[in-house]
Amino acid sequence: MSMINYQKKEVICKIVYYGPGLSGKTTNLKQLAEKVPQSMYNPTGKLIALAINMDTEQSQYSGRTRFFDFLPLEETVGSFQVKFQTYSVPGQMAFAATRRQMLRGVDGIVFVADSQADRLNDNIESFQELQQAMDELQLEAPLILQVNKIDLPHNIPKFTLRNALNPALALKNVFESSAQQGVGVEETYRAICERVLQNVGLKKQGITSRRRIRA
């Protein structure tokens, strides 16, 4: 849940990029780190890789270290400084506990789907895992679906992929992209930021509400 400091005029929001392994989550953040205006970088720097101790993961990766990515960006909205703490999580099935932990306190989710036809089941499994985790953790947050890798052959149309994952998701919340080429990356990010700001009630005149809604 967004942290609002009225004295400092500061809002901290958490955005998580979720999806199956190799769908393009880290590529999105790398592209954002290169594309966003310099004014949006906070003093901690650009894209940061943070280590995860896998001793707690019940998998063949136990005892080894993997990374998730953290991109700290900020923007002035009205009289408030909004800090977007943006994460991408490892998509491999072995890291389910890590992904679940990273969802705690989330304010907005970008689900990065791999549009390649042979990845359909991977997308469905990952999305179902996300829904289950959100329900069990009693979390509600806006969601943007990014249909990635549209530049490659044998891809699934965005309407078909949307229907396979969540037919109720409004098409205005579905974005096509080629993250490797930088296409659709900023549009996706702007969309989730706008939805997050709407959720916390942040408008040009300031904070008006903390009401949270589901996408």
Image (tube, rainbow, N blue to C red):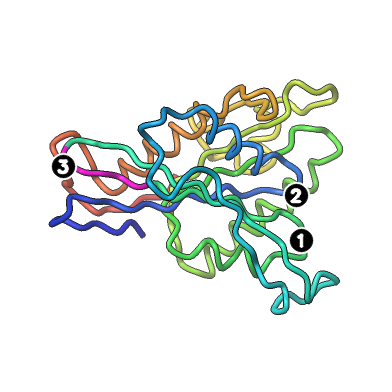
Q: Are marks 1 and 2 in contact (CB under 8 Å)?
A: yes
Residue at horizontal 35 percent and vertical 47 percent from the top? 83
Which mark sits nearer the N-terminus, 2 or 3? Answer: 2
> Looking at numbered disc 3 in the image, what kind of residue is underneath it?
Gly
Q: Which residues are magenta?
A: 79-83
Quarter of image, res 8: bottom left
Residue at horizontal 77 percent and vertical 65 percent from the top? 94
Secondary structure under tag 3 reads strand
Separation of marks 1 and 2 at Cα, in angstroms: 8 Å
Q: Is residue 157 left or right of 42 when viewed as pictured?
A: right
**Residue 56, horizontal then vertical, whole percent:** 69, 79
Q: Is residue 106 left or right of 1 when viewed as pictured?
A: right
Which mark sits nearer the N-terminus, 1 or 2? Answer: 2
Judge the density around disc 1: few (<14), some (14-19), many (≥20) Cα neighbours within 10 Å: some
Q: Most prominent secondary structure in the magenta stretch?
A: strand
Separation of marks 3 and 1 at Cα, in angstroms: 41 Å
Residue position for label 2: 21
Which mark sits nearer the N-terminus, 3 or 1? Answer: 1
Judge the density around disc 3: few (<14), some (14-19), many (≥20) Cα neighbours within 10 Å: some
Is 107 inside the magenta-drawn segment?
Answer: no
Residue position for label 3: 206
